Image (cartoon, grey):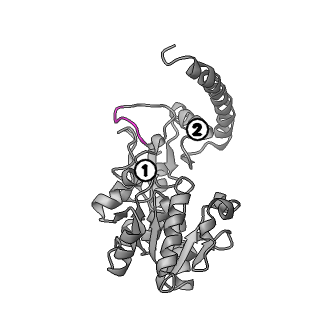
Amino acid sequence: NEFGPDLLDEMVEAMTDRMYYFVITKDYCAKILDKAQPKLIMELCYYSMESFAMSALGKEKGIPTAEYAHGFAFPTHTPMQFNPEERIAVLPDYELIYSHSQDNIVHLPDNIPLVTVGFPFFEREREKYKAKYPRDERTICFISTLAEGEQISKIASELADRIGDEYHIIYKLHPHEFSYYKERFPWLVNDKLEVIDNTDNHIFKYLAESKLCVGTRTASIWEAIGFGCETVLLNFGDTAINMRYFIEEKNVPLVDNVDELISLIKNDGAGKVEPDGMFEPESFNKICEFINKIINRQ
């Protein structure tokens, strides 16, 4: 009634379905907890319906719950933005995050502590890939995104046309772009540009090989910095808002065009961020310490 018939027609039925699904899921999850009798519930994505149910049940049954973040959050990532005083039964008791770079980006209610534990997979794989694929000081890696793929790819292709004889330029497509990029981004068919349109190799291979990473709002920027890559951000979409941490606190340059990018490349002006600050070290041990601390309280 407040916002009009479109909202009523489109949302009420969907919201009612989710409410019913939550009740059904919670009943099913309660049976699991009754059998398992856990001392701690670890969740991968707190806002999946199963995690909502587990968090609510944990509060009812006195079982602590913790979400281990499944990725990096951004200022516009709504599920990680709450008012301090909110108290919501389906939120976990603890939030485990990758690094202190998230401290001023994740805003959960103030009764949910942020626990910085790192990212064991990244920590392990980084050493493996760096040992296998040495850095090439002439390699530049572009990271595509679904939202800005057309704009990023045009910059990459133009850069390849202009300095592709001097540098090895890689364009890492988003997996959803594999099937259509030749039709939608024909400029990527360029002899001076290596387009990665398959999953034969993990993205870590290209980050290990590259001196410079270029992209917009993507968690791969955190990973690239973690690999020791220099960084340049492209001013497309909401990059200026969502990557403000890097731009304002870490002095990573934000550019609008190829001329600015080339100037940074030629004058050694790309962003240089301390790689070890991206992920908390000794991550596996820190996660084990957290788990043991919770269990030993009981």
How many badges with numbers are in the image?
A: 2
Q: Position of residue 198 (x, y in %)?
A: 68, 69
Q: Residue at x 46, y 45 (%)?
A: 77
User: Badge 1 local density, few (<14 within 10 Å), some, or many (20+)?
Assistant: some
Q: Residue furthest top?
A: 1
Q: Is-magenta flag for residue 271?
A: no
> In this orientation, which residue lies closer to the viewer: 105 or 221?
221
Residue holding disc 1: 238
Q: Position of residue 126 (x, y in %)?
A: 51, 74
Q: Which residues are magenta?
A: 81-85
> In this orientation, which residue lies closer to the viewer: 298 or 213?
213
Q: Position of residue 63 (x, y in %)?
A: 52, 39
Instruction: Give the residue type at disc 2.
Output: Met
Q: Is residue 136 visible?
A: no
Dot 1: element: loop
Q: Quadrant of residue 100 in the image?
A: bottom left
Are discs 1 and 2 less than 8 Å apart at CB?
Answer: no
User: Badge 2 local density, few (<14 within 10 Å), some, or many (20+)?
Assistant: many
Q: Is residue 7 above or below residue 242?
A: above
How far is disc 1 from disc 2 in space, using C-alphas?
Answer: 34 Å
